[in-house]
Each structure stands twice: as structure tokens, then as C-alpha cells.
Amino acid sequence: MHEWFCGRTAFHCHRTPPQLKCLMPLFPDIGYPKQKLALKRQYNDACGWKNVLGPLPLDTIVSEPDFRRKGAVIQPHLWSGEPPSPSFYDDPDLGISYASPQFTLLTMATQLSVVQLAMAMYEMCGSFAVFQPSKDLQKALDRIEPTRLRWPGGWKQVMTTKGEPTSLWKRDPLVELPDLYAYAQHLDGIRGVKNYRAALKLITGSAASPLEARLSMLLSLPRSRGGEEFPTFINNQRIDLSSSAARLAGKSTCYADLYFPETEEHPAIDVECQGRAVHAGDQQSEADANRATAIQIMNIEVIQVTHAQIMDERSFETFCDYLAHKLQVKRAPKTTRMATRAQTLRSEVLGSWDSLGGGL
């Protein structure tokens, strides 16, 4: 029996870089109990299936009630009728079929909270992925990475200042935000649609890192959900540089992380997210400083916020006070209920992004 993976299992498939997929054997046939037992015994081995598909049991779609029996390896989900299009992708490298980004998110809508589902949406329509290879797979990746200049989809692993691999990957978006909205229009009456649409409303745009997505949610969500409810901003706004700014930046275009357009009350403001060090030391620091100055030459004020400032509640409050001052907006004191909801939101948004959709 051919398996059709959905939900958290499909989400893990979408997180898997093509560099690793080409190293994997074809997924084994598990149509019979003995074959399922064999996979269970070997699942945590160095072959890497746990890395690709996530923890057991694996989420699958079935069309007949007779196939709904749950086991240690398979968690079937009954789907009556034709799934909304696009529904499934065939992956020749792995020999499996798994849900499209849109259908993956819909089938995760009953597995995650609305906030967690929004985080998964940010990753799907963002230019990043989070994937932590096992030690054996990382060694294999290190051997093949120098052999190719560009992988399909622009997948590239981000390194630390010491040249060590991280779980953060840069890649092209898997789906565009307008596509998620278009998909939502055809889901009336389908299980999970309420959470899917609610999560979609929390997305501000295409983020380039988990830190940008986290900050976007903390700043944009309404206070009723624990957010700061700042004015509308744009994720990764393109800025065409003047000739003088371009000479300093070494390029003609920059992108602002969180861009607040100019109004009568304040100039244009770019909030830049400074993640934990993942670049090449002093040379990259100089390039970042030149880039910030180039953006300021374009009459855009740059405000930098660090990973540590976002993670520390008091520091984040100080940052929000400063941003509100620059935007000329008032921050009313939080009620006890608002403060509780803010704590809840922070616990979800600032948790381990690696384990989103089911940890390894």
C-alpha cells in the first residue's frame, strides 16, 4: 500500500534539504505488519528516516475507514472525498508522496495551536527552514556541499562565526502568502479550516529567519492575543539605494527586516533583527554596519534589536517602549489579563523552533 504523508510528517519532509534527500535510500514498503516492524526497529538508525520524517507514528491520509487502525508506525487520518488542490507531491528522491505546503498546513491545523500553526506558515512562506541533521548525515553533507554551487530552491546551510553548521537553512519560499489566502477560500466545511484561517490572519509577510517571524508575531498580534499591536509593517521591504548608499553597501538593493513606512508622525523605520552570531566575524560585522548606514542614507531610521533582547522579557519591554516613542504611538499599561496572555504568547513563540511540528 502506498503511503500519503500529511500533517507533521509532511512538514518534516518540506524541511528536509535536497542535499540530504539525494543521500537517502528509497522509503521501504510498509504495507504489511512485518515491514512496519522492521522500519520501527531501524527508524532511529543512521540511515536518517527520523531526520526526514520526524518522530513516529507517521501521519498519513487514508480514504477508507478500514485503514484507520492506528499503530506504532502509522497514524492514519481519514479524508473523505477529493483533497483540495494542490494536494500531494511525489518525491522521486525519497520514493514517497507527501502533502503540498498548503495541504500540509491544513492537516496540521488540528494538531497545533493557532499560534504554532502561524509559526509553521511563517516558515513555509519565508526564505528559511529549520533542519538539524544527525552527526552522520552532517558528515555526509559536508562531503557533498562543496561539489555544487547551487541546490534546487537555493538551499544553503547557515554557519556560525567559527564555520560550524547550524540548524538554520536559507532557501526560496515554498509557497507565497497570496497562495495560502487563495487556498483558504476553497475550504468551507473542511475540518481544520477555522484554525487555518485564524492562523493566516496572524501572518504579516515573508520572514527571512525564525527571529524575524517571532518578532513579527510579538509586535503585530493584537493585545487580546498577547501581542503589542503595533502599526502595520512590511517584512523584508526592498530598498533601492542611491549611488552613494550603494557604494557604501557594495550593492544596489537592501532589504529591511521589519519596515514601518513613513507617516506624518515619524520617518520610515527599519527594525533590524540581530540573531545569534552566524556569520564570518569581523568582515561580516563591517558589512552589516555599512548596510545599516546605507539604509540610513536613504532617510530610513534603523533600530537594531538582538536575539537576547527579544528573549529577555524586561529588555523586550524596554525595546517596545523605545519603538513606540519613535513611532509616536502610546503604549497603554497592560491589564492583568493582557499580561497573562503576553506570557502565554511568549512561551509559544519563543520556544524551540526546531521542534515545531513535533520534536526529534
Image (cartoon, grey):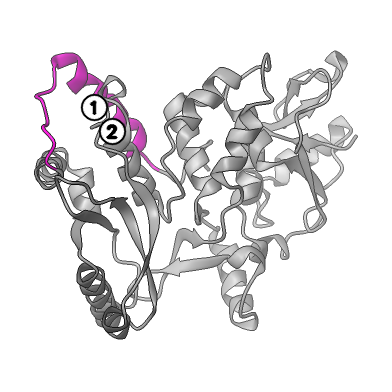
Left or right side of 269 for 325: left
Please give the label number shown on residue 112.
none
> In the figure, residue 214 lies in which quadrant?
top left
Looking at the rendered structure, the secondary structure element under dot 1 is: helix
Residue 207 located within the stretch drawn in magenta: no
**Viewer-side residue, 65 vs 42:** 65
Q: How many other residues sit within 10 Å of disc 2, few (<14), some (14-19) or many (≥20)?
A: some
Amino acid type at circle 2 is: Arg
Please determine whether, in this image, residue 193 is positioned above or below residue 269: above
Residue 340 drawn in magenta = yes
Magenta part of the protein: which range? 328-352
Which residue is denoted by mark 1 in the rendering? Answer: 343
Mark 1 residue crowding within 10 angstroms, few (<14) / some (14–19) / many (20+): some
Q: Residue furthest front?
A: 264
Q: Determine the image quadrant of residue 37.
A: top right
The answer to whether residue 138 is seen in the rendering is yes
Mark 1 and mark 2: Cα distance apart in space = 5 Å
Specify the quadrant of the image occupied by residue 202.
top left
Residue 71, image x, y percentages: 73, 24
> Which residue is located at x 75 percent, y 38 percent?
86
Image coords of residue 131 (percent x, y): 52, 54
Image point (45%, 32%), residue name: 116
The reply to whether the C-beta atoms of the residues labelled 1 and 2 are less than 8 Å apart is: yes
Mark 2 secondary-structure assignment: helix
Which residue is pictured at 38% across the width and 80% down the height? 251
Count up the numbered dots: 2
Mark 2 sits on what residue?
A: 346
Residue at point 25%, 74% (across, down): 294
Which quarter of the figure is the N terminus placed in? top right
| Amino acid of disc 1 | Gln
